[in-house]
Amino acid sequence: MTEDEVRRLLDARTATIDPPPAPLPEITRLGQSRRRHQRILRAAGAAALVAAVVLGGVGLRLVLEGASSAAPSSQQTSALGGQPPTADQLYGYWRAVTLFGHHVGQPSGPIQKSLIVEFFHARPGSITVDAAKGFTGLGWSGSDLCNTTSGIVLLGEDGTFRLGQADRTQIGCPALQGRLRFEAVRAVLHARWARISNGDLVLYSAKAGKIARFTRIGPAPVSKAKSGAESSHRSPPSTTLAPSAPPTK
Amino acid sequence: MTQDADFADYAGARWRSLVKSAVLLGCSPSEAEDLAQTVLVRCYASWRKVSQASNRDAYVYRMLVNCHRDTHRRMWRGEQPTASLDESSSPLASTSDPASEAELSDAVQRALDGLSPSLRQVVVLRFCADLSTAAVAEALGIPEGTVKSRTARALTELGRNPHLVDTNEGVDG
């Protein structure tokens, strides 16, 4: 069948169709009504977008500054003692001396292995949340006494301190260490304030309760400091799981 | 020329074609008028966008096809397909009398009903709305090559359609 034949057939089909003239007044009236609805919907959509941006911004700010709502009063922070640390002061290896009032690394204590945390320079681009307010360019790495964990460091000028999410899997970890692991991870992840006191790093909770005291065991090797930026999730040295050693303090 | 006057000219010129195209897409005449009116209402509401389209007709017929599809998606037609058709429905060779015209019209409608929706849309837009291959491609959002292949397939299917076998002479003659 040719195109012309199809045209003729379609003409034959529609030959008897003789619609009345286009109802232009009705079409115009309905079209104007539709325009009004579209305008209202656009205005409502724009308002909703603005509200979402504003509320989202507020929400994000609250999330990023989550500690602020539970932050201690100025009276409490003044009682923290010591000085807020800078990123350079944190950089390097720190060994836990006390965790929740217990000495760490003593054969008779509840936490018999030593806990060492490393703060290293992180390349911003390698961390997905590098735009987070307060990100200092520092990453942290440490052991939960079973697995190596790591994340980012949020450090405010006033000493507000937060560590980013850490992997907390317990797969393959001895059951005996479960409680110890929990305590160790809790110590670093629940910290909201940091102070340098007598050369030690002291971490406080949001309510200004002392969580842990760390003592510096030397800066990171120079080579590691330079290459540390290449990976924010590298493993800390094997000494992080070193056998228990007597605390220095 | 004001926008309203421009729209009125366009709507007046395309009204019959829109209604006929809607009929060929499968609407009853009254449904076709409603569908064409709906399309023109939408055109009026967005006339600035429609009038600035590279191919205004392609834009409008795309709205027609979409409206038709939406309408038929929503409502159950209540039509019952039949496995075989009555022999008496074959079109007559002559179109000179009203009865013959009605039968030819019915035969064309049945033949169109036998096409898949995609082939039917191409046939209607190409041969009833008289859109170019490029405009049909734009209206349906498919490549031009697909329009050509669908057109060829539709012509082949229509040529083999039992309802239209005897119509060529009748239409020509």
Image: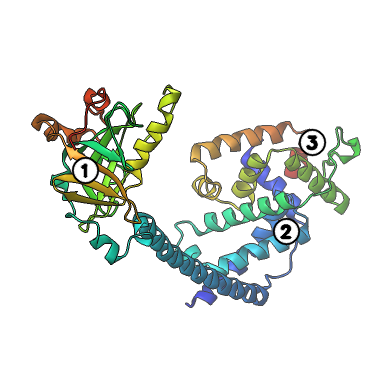
Q: Chain of mark 2?
A: B
Q: Chain of mark 3?
A: B
Look at label 1 and name its amino acid: Leu
Q: Nearer the viewer, residue A117 or A95?
A: A95
Local secondary structure at mark 3: loop
**Residue shown at the point (26%, 45%) measured from the top left:** A153
Look at label 3 and name its amino acid: Asp
Look at label 2 and name its amino acid: Ala
Using the image, determine if residue A164 lies above or below residue B71.
above
Question: Which numbered dot is residue A148?
Answer: none
Residue A239 location (% of width, % of height): 22, 24
* Image quarter in which the C terminus of chain A is found: top left
* Image quarter in which the N terminus of chain A is found: top right
**Is A26 placed left or right of A215 in the picture?**
right
Q: CA distance from mark 3 to mark 1?
A: 85 Å
**Residue shown at the point (83%, 41%) measured from the top left:** B91
1 and 2 marks on the same chain: no
For disc 3, the marked residue is: B166
Local secondary structure at mark 1: strand
Q: CA distance from mark 1 to mark 2?
A: 68 Å
Q: In this rendering, which labeled residue sits more in front, label 2 or label 3? A: 2
